[in-house]
Image (spheres, grey):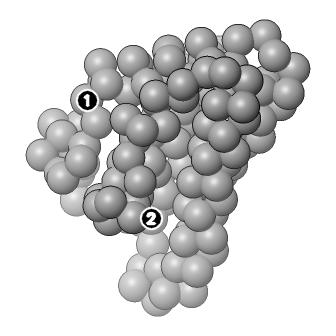
Amino acid sequence: MISTFREYLTQPKALSPDTMHSIHEALLEDVGSDPDALELYHDLLAVSVKYAKIRAGWPLLTRSQKMDSDSDRTSCHDSVISHFNMLARYAKQQGKNAAWRDTLGYEEDDPYNRKAIGDFACYLAFVNALNAR
């Protein structure tokens, strides 16, 4: 199976490139030059890269490999969500509105928001990879 970005955009809660860019810009504005926020962002990037690696390889795995790896993938995804929440909570404590976190949505409101959060983590890994040239 060959995947395309156009195919991704047909999925529920898919984030357009413009939306991902806007969320990223708002998140970075909240981070600013605050050393604690930068550390939280670095930690978020690290777990996002780990998650993106797992997710990018997922379609290449056999059914048996997926069954063996599913709990690790879920755990990593949970960690991604926790890191987004930690950064948003810190930003709010610093007087920022962290509206970017609300834009991503919460899985309690709609299970597809979990997928969108994972998508955005992959976007962060993508941007990080492109800038590592």
On residue 58, which mark appears?
Answer: 2
Position above or below: 35 against 92? above
Residue type beneath disc 2: Trp
Q: Amino acid at mark 1?
A: Ser
Q: Secondary structure at mark 1?
A: loop
Residue 63: x %, y % from top left: 40, 85
Provide the residue designation for mark 1: 16
In this image, 7 relative to 77: left or right? left
Depth order, front residue of 17/93: 93
**Percent x, y of residue 6:** 16, 37
Q: Secondary structure at mark 2?
A: helix
Q: Can the viewer see residue 23 in this picture?
A: yes
Q: Nearer the viewer, residue 60 or 68?
A: 68
Q: 113 or 65: nearer the eye? A: 113
The image quadrant that residue 102 belongs to is top left
| Spot occupied by residue 35 in the image (x, y as percentages of width and height) | 87, 20
